[in-house]
Amino acid sequence: MSKKIKAGIEIIEKLRGDVKLQYDYYKHMTIINAGSILVIIALFEGVFEDPKGIEIIIISIVSFVVSLVCSLEIMSMIGNLVLYLTEIHRVSITKSKDEANKISAKMKSTIKKIQVFTDLHGIFFYLGIVMLVYFAIYNFLQE
C-alpha cells in the first residue's frame, strides 16, 4: 500500500471520529429538545394555576420542535457523510477519479446542507430557551 493511500486512510479514519462526535452531539440535542417540550408542558399544566402568555409558550414549543426536526435531519445527513467517507476509501483503492469526484461533490453538498440546518437548529433552540425563561419569569411575577 502506498504512502498516499495510507495517509488518505488515516485522514478518513480521523474524519469518521469527528463525524461520530457531531452525531452524538445532535443525538443529545434531540433529547434536550424533547425534554424541554416536556418541561413546558409541566410548567403549563402543573406549576402555574392560571398561566399567562400562552403565545409565548406556543413560540417556545414550536421553536423546540423545529430544533428537534433540524437535529434529526442533521443526524441523517451525518449518516450520509459516513457512507460517503466509506465510498471515498473504496474509490481511493480502485483509483477511479470520476467516481471520487462525484462522491466529493455529494459530500460538499451535504456539508452545505448541514451548515444551514445547524444554523436553523441553533437559532430555534435558543429562541425556545429564551421564550421558556421569559414565560416562567413572567408567570412567577404574576403570582
Image (cartoon, helix red, strand yellow):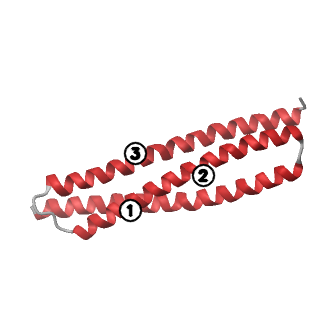
Q: Residue shown at 15%/59% (left/top)? A: 140
Secondary structure beneath label 1: helix
Quarter where residue 49 is shown: bottom left
| Between marks 2 and 1 in the image, the one whose residue lies nearer the viewer | 2
Quarter where residue 56 is shown: bottom left
Q: Residue shown at 54%/59% (left/top)? A: 117
Secondary structure beneath label 2: helix
Q: Amino acid at mark 2?
A: Met
Up-down: is 21 above or below 65? above
Secondary structure beneath label 3: helix
Q: Amino acid at mark 3?
A: Ile
Alpha carbon separation for disc pair 1 and 3: 14 Å
Q: Earlier in the sequence, mark 1 or mark 3?
A: 3
Q: Which mark is residue 31?
A: 3
- Residue at label 2? 77
- Residue at label 1? 63
Residue density around tag 2, few if under 14, some if 14–19, many if 20 or more, within 10 Å: some
Q: Residue shown at 17%/67% (left/top)? A: 52
Alpha carbon separation for disc pair 2 and 3: 18 Å
Residue density around tag 3, few if under 14, some if 14–19, many if 20 or more, within 10 Å: few
Q: Amino acid at mark 1?
A: Ser
Cβ atoms under marks 2 and 1 closer than 8 Å: no
Q: Earlier in the sequence, mark 2 or mark 1?
A: 1
**Position of residue 143 measured from the top left corner of the image (x, y, whole percent):** 9, 61
**Position of residue 16 measured from the top left corner of the image (x, y, whole percent):** 66, 39
Work out whether residue 86 or residue 137 is closer to the camera in this orientation and state it.
86
Q: Quadrant of the N terminus?
A: top right
